[in-house]
Amino acid sequence: MVDPISTPWPQARPARIAVLCGYMTYYEPHMPAGFRDQRVAWGQKITEIVATEGEARFFGLMTDAGVGEEVARALMQWRPDVLLLAPAMPGPPAFTWRAIASLPRVPAVVWSAGHLDTLPQSYDSVDHLANSGGVGVAMIGNLLARDGRGMRVVAGRWYDEQAQHRVREAVRLAAVAGRMASARVAVLGAPLDGYSNVVIAPELLSSALGATLVDIPLDEWEHAFAQTSQEDAEAVATVLRTRIAVDDAEGEDFRRSSKLAAALRTICDRYDADCGTFNSHLEFGHANEKIGLVGGMATSWMTSNGTPFTDTGDTVSALAMLLARLLAGNAIYTELNTIDYGRDAILCANTGEIDFAATVEGRSWVFPAAAYTGRRQRGCIVDAEVRTGPATIIGFSPYGRARSGVKLIAFAGTVTGRPELALRVPHTLFRPATTDAATAFAGWIEAGATHHAALCVGGDYRAEVAEIGRLLGIDVETIA
């Protein structure tokens, strides 16, 4: 059972980090007794260094083709998000390649993890073999490059804290890229009529990024909603009542929206979805007599619990939301609605969705959609005040001039606060980092952004988005 008081809004599952070390048995007779055991222990220490970034596993020394094949089977079963390759010495790269060849979309961090500060006068042939892991780095790096794999190479002594920091950061970003490349996007409902700008062809998504659209059949969704237990719905309701201000907390709209949120969780778990889109306006939601609900509260629940969701059948922004959530720990589904020329800022707002991880404590509200919006709809939506400070808006879309056919866009600025408006949906002002609002807004549209995006608070993530795009082999444009 979730503890609604002490549990923070959760993040995505921990990144899976596979550590492999190249090795060459040919030179082993020349090395001191116990050298192989020493390098195994060294590989385990490297695994411990990056364990702060997720679940790290050491898959051993790649000593021959048989070991490579055995490790390949283990990796296919475990499905890592990132490979950390740290050659223990010069070694045939084909053995490591056998282990990773069946993971074409998994980015690699290659660490030339040195063992010496400087070369002593006594440096001999044994030392030369023990300290020439950089040769092994060049060997496996070449095979990665030949195959077009995304990689980041870090050179630095393995015991140096700055080098360790660079490796951990490289692993963190590569793992985000790996999650994007393997993402499964749950699709519940087609977009609104004419909304051709929020979709992507499954074939293009697969070829350009590696991600998969998973269409949920309507009858299965209806059954999942019908079969959702009162206990599961009440678990959602209890957390929200405890942590969020809920209008009419015992009312029918809130009760059924809690059931809707629990049903979305069931579907996502069933299909192993990383993110999704739920068009609650049509037959999967409000227009369905078996459901009859808008989805603002339910999708907010999903996003706040680590599985970001969009509305209106928007699959491209679902991927932008996933990237923002993995990168920053929060993701708000938003639109860049209008320019406030007096405040030199852009109004970002939506129709009742939020990530509670991005909000000011005590400044979130859940209420029936019909209560304040004038909508003749059932179900609950959300309003909230977004935290102020540095922030980034992320977009993803097909793009005709992109080398892979798709593009990421990162727009940096500052969330300056919630203006006093009559709106009862999440809204905030966003001021661009380096230019005026009108110029930056025009640049955002010229870059190819669609009308939905992911707003994440906490930092300027343009450099990180650029690195993730480089690892994925897709175009990135930064704004402001």
Image (cartoon, grey):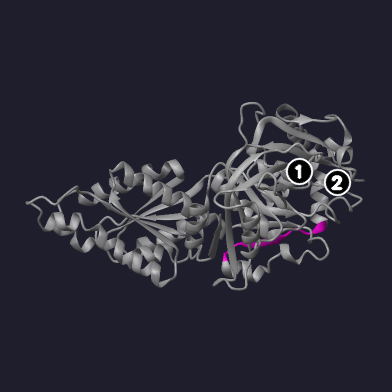
Q: Is residue 422 above or below residue 208?
A: above
* Residue at 43% in and 51% down: 171
Q: Is residue 387 above or below residue 113?
A: above
For the record, the magenta segment spans: 209-218
Badge 1 element: helix
Q: Toward which corner of the image does residue 70 lie, by quadrant?
A: bottom left
Q: Amino acid at mark 2?
A: Leu
Q: CA distance from mark 1 to mark 2?
A: 10 Å
> Does the magenta run of residues contain 44?
no
* Residue at 29% in and 51% down: 156
Residue to which mark 2 is pinned: 293
Is residue 245 among the parts visible in the rendering?
Answer: yes
Q: Amino acid at mark 1?
A: Ala
Q: Which numbered dot is residue 298?
A: 1
Q: Is residue 294 left or right of residue 349?
A: right
Q: Residue furthest front?
A: 342
Residue contact between numbered discs 1 and 2, judged by CB atoms under 8 Å: yes
